[in-house]
Image (tube, rainbow, N blue to C red):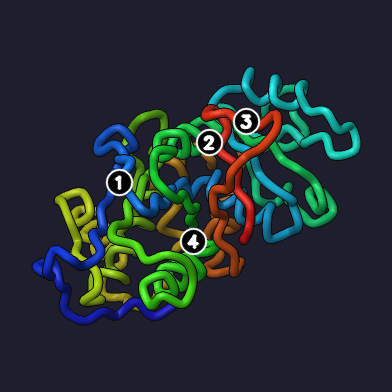
Amino acid sequence: MNLDRSAQHENAPLNRVELRVSLLPEMEPVAPAVDVAIVIDVLRATSVIPTALANGAVQVMTCESIDQARTLRDQWDDVKTIPLLCGERMCQPIPGFDLGNSPAEYSPESVGGRNLIVTTTNGTRAIQSAREAREIWLASFLNLEAVLNRLSGRLSGETGASIKNVHLVCAGTERAITLEDVFLAGCVVDQLGSNATFQVVGDQARLARHAFRSILGTNVDLTSESLSQALRDTQGGRNLIQRGYEPDLSRCAQLNLHDVVPVRVVSTGAVATPDVVTFQLD
């Protein structure tokens, strides 16, 4: 994936699309005026959810707590479509849940045609923090190109309503900034910041872009192999290695594996509550 970019346009007119970053959800809360919030939890929630939907899951319902997840399934009124309970705490599968939080678990055989309920340590908390935005999308390295293409389509008027601002939200790890999420946010800023349509706003966005460029160095051709190696030297990566999930670093570094963008949809029935944010493909 070639990432060589031309000069930036940070001083673009104010009527251009503002691009902001929160290095942690609480560092700059997502405002109701935000058109598109893009939540990033590279290791691993926003890598797992695109994988599940690409492999045939009907919808993914996210909630912040384990109790909420269990209650949601207990309230499900159709035995034939009862959801799978999925997620983790501190990288480990949750006792009594059907699936953990490794992309390897979300094969077509496991999730095809199924509803999923997901709760994780960091990612679903970040999703909740973005719920005031008009739209929520999920991004990872697995669907990076799809996210960028969707943004381009919105800017050109080819798909959906026009947008005035985009806010990238990094999940972090246990309420601390983590490099893997900042790296992806910086990659998006680097890609979009060279487009005169965008105005990069705030030091958090500039810091993310600087981190991305610093890690990438002089190698402007990001590959899955180089990305996997970079993920090893992040807090999230070290946590996974320590807990026996090192293969997930390579799984979450597969650039543009899925041509999908999970987007929030309006929930109905038992899931029509602010505590549940539901994603599908549109």
Query: Label 1 sits on what residue type?
Result: Ala
Comes first in the chain, label 4 or label 1: 1
Residue 60's x, y, as percent?
66, 44
Residue 90's x, y, as percent?
54, 28
Query: Label 4 sits on what residue type?
Result: Phe
Q: Nearer the viewer, mark 1 or mark 3?
A: 1
The residue lying at 26 percent from left, 58 percent from top is 19
Label 4 and label 2: CA atoms lie apart by 22 Å
Question: Where on the picture, by quarter, is residue 16?
Answer: bottom left
Q: Which residue is mark 1?
A: 33
**How many neighbours does mark 2 have within 10 angstroms: few (below 14), some (14-19), or many (20 or more)?**
few
From the viewer's perspective, is 89 left or right of 140?
right
Label 4 and label 3: CA atoms lie apart by 22 Å
Question: Where on the picture, by quarter, is residue 118?
Answer: top right
Residue 92 - label: 3
The quarter of the rendered structure image containing the C terminus is bottom right
Q: Which residue is mark 2?
A: 242
Label 2 and label 3: CA atoms lie apart by 11 Å
From the viewer's perspective, is 160 left or right of 75?
left
**How many neighbours does mark 4 have within 10 angstroms: few (below 14), some (14-19), or many (20 or more)?**
many
Is residue 126 something that shows in the picture?
yes
Residue 200 - label: none
Label 2 and label 1: CA atoms lie apart by 40 Å
The quarter of the rendered structure image containing the N terminus is bottom left
Q: Nearer the viewer, mark 2 or mark 3?
A: 3
In the rendered view, would you say 43 is above or below 281? Answer: above
Q: Nearer the viewer, mark 4 or mark 2?
A: 4
Comes first in the chain, label 2 or label 1: 1
Comes first in the chain, label 4 or label 3: 3
